[in-house]
Image (cartoon, rainbow, N blue to C red):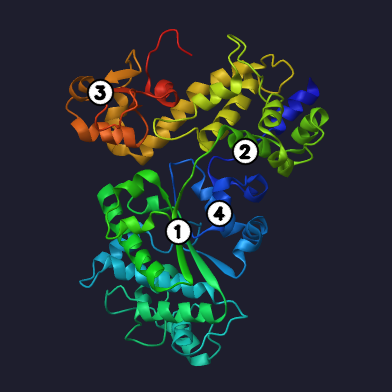
Amino acid sequence: MADQDAELRALDFGQVDSESEPDLDAKFLRTSDFEEFVGRRCDLVRGPKGSGKSALFRLFARHEEYAVQLAGSALQHVLIATATGLDGTRELSTDDFKRLERGSHFDVEQVWFSYLALKAAEAIKRPEFRPRGELARFMHSTGIRADRRLLPSIKRMWNRTVSDTTPTVRKLQILSSGLEVGGRTEGFDMRDILRLIDEFLRENGLRVWLLFDNLDELFALRREKRAEVLSALFSVCNHVRGSFEAIEPKLFIRSDIWNDLQFTNKSHWVGKQIDLTWTPEQLAALMLKRALAAKPIQARLARALPQLTGPDAVEELSYPERQAALHLVFEPTLSADHWPTWPWMLDRARDGHFGPLPRELITFGMQARAAQLEGRFEAGGALIAGEAVRKAYPVVSRLRCETFLSEFPELREHFQRFRGQTTPRFHRAQLERVVMKDLEPSGKEMVEALCEVGVIAPADGHHHGVAKEFDVPLLYRPGLGLLLRGRR
């Protein structure tokens, strides 16, 4: 019992957000989506919150060497550069846009052109590269490449103010570094700079990936403004994709935000996108790989399954073998009614639009571990009893609802209206005229909004625009406060 208690305390499924995961490379699961991302021209990665977009982004951003190893020859001659998405490199924040907007010459597309030029130039600042001419002058004047000449260095130290508010590259550099730069006062044409970078890359047999993540942080509380700013970004990236073959912007974005965007030639992204999805087999591998990051768990599982020599060995297991390994972590059935534990968890980790999703299963695992440590339930030889999993479920639901309220504050009152309801199924008229009466958004827009975030889903298989009845998915029922008798 003492050994099992120590193993349970060592068990750690990791963080739900990849930003907080220090050893993501050891826990990353190579899926078919990864293979597709590196195997063909893919410039758009879509998925709901918790689907693994940021994990894929950070694998390349923080663990490039490991990502290259996984990708094999697919990433030869590719330079990886992060734009938005990493701590300390979010140069273009909401506050920065607000400051730029005060200028009479503000143009959001020009801001993005300048930003892409800066990030693409940063990718070729490595010592082995020697840009010349106008490109070299651009890199010197913006401070991207250290200028060894004394006079420009002194100018960079002393020239700390600007007189205009035009969103030129010189103004953008102030926002990111706090320093004015020396060099040309008339600025640069960003399209010319991008052309020069593209020529330099092609001459050297190279390409650059510009990775964008955390785009939801721009104007997070102003949905329409965020859509305007991000639509401009995608419009600029369309131009870059069509004009410069060696510069490849790759954007990671939530599915609901993508649906809000309106820009010319949006259809041009069709065929160049991946919608992240997870199968039960992949999710089982993900949970096992994370669990096996702890040495005591490796030893425990290897005694029953000798082929489990470490986290990477999980990917070689068949699905039945993965389930057998999971049964050593979670009790195979829920003790009260003998319902299989893993399918029960999967059913409660999906919303009305996507799922099941990694974020909810990781939360499930961690909350079930906490419940087992507190309750000391009999687990039948596993580490975590079915009863602990059952007790974790309402906590998972509540955390999901709290997370979504921070993302969609305009739906707070709508969420509260579900509290005390005694059924998970609602007729459209009941939702529009009774449950959500006098709230905004209302009517059809309200139904669309709740369906978009997965809080309800059509019960009859029809599109939400014509469906007559809607269900609240299992994931949300306890967190929303539904009172459902006889249901677990």
**In what element is the residue under mark 4?**
helix
Judging depth in this view, the residue of 461 and 367 nearest the camera is 461
Cα gap from disc 3 to disc 2, whole angstroms = 37 Å
Cα gap from disc 3 to disc 1, whole angstroms = 37 Å
According to the image, label 2 marks what residue? 286
Query: Looking at the rendered structure, which numbered label has been put on residue 225?
Result: none
According to the image, label 3 marks what residue? 468
Q: Earlier in the sequence, mark 2 or mark 4?
A: 4
Q: Residue at x 38, y 73 (%)?
A: 243
Asked if residue 440 shows in the view, the reply is no
According to the image, label 4 marks what residue? 58
Q: Earlier in the sequence, mark 3 or mark 2?
A: 2
Q: Residue at x 33, y 37 (%)?
A: 452
Amino acid bearing label 4: Arg
Looking at the image, residue 65 lies above or below residue 448: below
According to the image, label 1 marks what residue? 43
Of circles 2 and 4, the one toward us is 2
Q: Are marks 2 and 4 in contact (CB under 8 Å)?
A: no
Amino acid bearing label 2: Leu
Q: Residues within 10 Å of mark 3 (few under 14, many from 20)?
A: some
Q: Residues within 10 Å of mark 4 (few under 14, many from 20)?
A: many
Q: Earlier in the sequence, mark 1 or mark 4?
A: 1
**Residue 407, horizontal then vertical, whole percent:** 37, 41
Cα gap from disc 1 to disc 4, whole angstroms = 16 Å
Of circles 3 and 4, the one toward us is 3
Cα gap from disc 1 to disc 2, whole angstroms = 25 Å
Q: Quadrant of the N terminus?
A: top right
